[in-house]
Image (tube, rainbow, N blue to C red):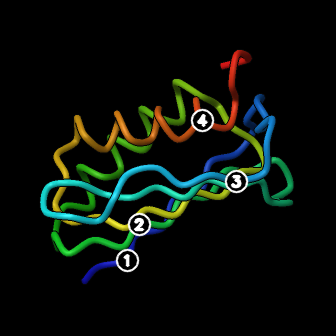
Amino acid sequence: METLNFRFEKGRKRLTSQANMVGVVSSGNLEVLIESADLNGGCEVEIKTAAVGFGAIWQAVISDFDARWSLQDVRILINDAGATPAVVSLRLDQAVESVMGASA
């Protein structure tokens, strides 16, 4: 198992509800827990993955996600079971949309 942590600053969007979880930990998939947190405007992402050695790919996918959503005061926890970058992006967007509703 590998744990990766990323933090982004200067986000502009806050969640409209407190927390939600999407996805499921199974082969080729992942679960995402998204929640509001007092992070001084930051967005933190923690990833626990069985696929060791893909930090650069995770960095690219999570940076792209941050550029799309620009979240502030949000904590995201990801439990990964070998999901592809496309599945990761889909689940992250699904998680944000589930807590942003029509304002997304």
Q: Secondary structure at mark 2?
A: strand
Q: Residue 79: which disc?
A: none
| Quarter of the image where one finds residue 87 | top left
Q: CA distance from mark 4 to mark 1?
A: 25 Å
Residue 47 placement (x, y as % from top left): 41, 66
Please state, as top left, top right, bottom left or bottom right, where the N terminus lies in the image. bottom left
Figure check: 99 above or below 52 = above
Of 66 and 37, nearer the camera is 37
| Residue labelled with disc 3 | 19
Q: CA distance from mark 1 to mark 3?
A: 22 Å
| Residue labelled with disc 4 | 98
Mark 4 residue type: Ser
First of labels 2, 4 by sequence position: 2
Q: Secondary structure at mark 4?
A: helix
- CB atoms of marks 2 and 3 within 8 Å: no
Which residue appears farthest toward the bottom when viewing the image? 1
- CB atoms of marks 4 and 1 within 8 Å: no
Residue drawn 54% across and 55% down?
21
| Residue labelled with disc 1 | 3
Neighbour tally class for label 1: few under 14, some 14-19, many 20 plus, Cα within 10 Å: few
Q: Secondary structure at mark 1?
A: strand
First of labels 1, 2 by sequence position: 1
Figure check: 34 above or below 65 = below
Neighbour tally class for label 4: few under 14, some 14-19, many 20 plus, Cα within 10 Å: some
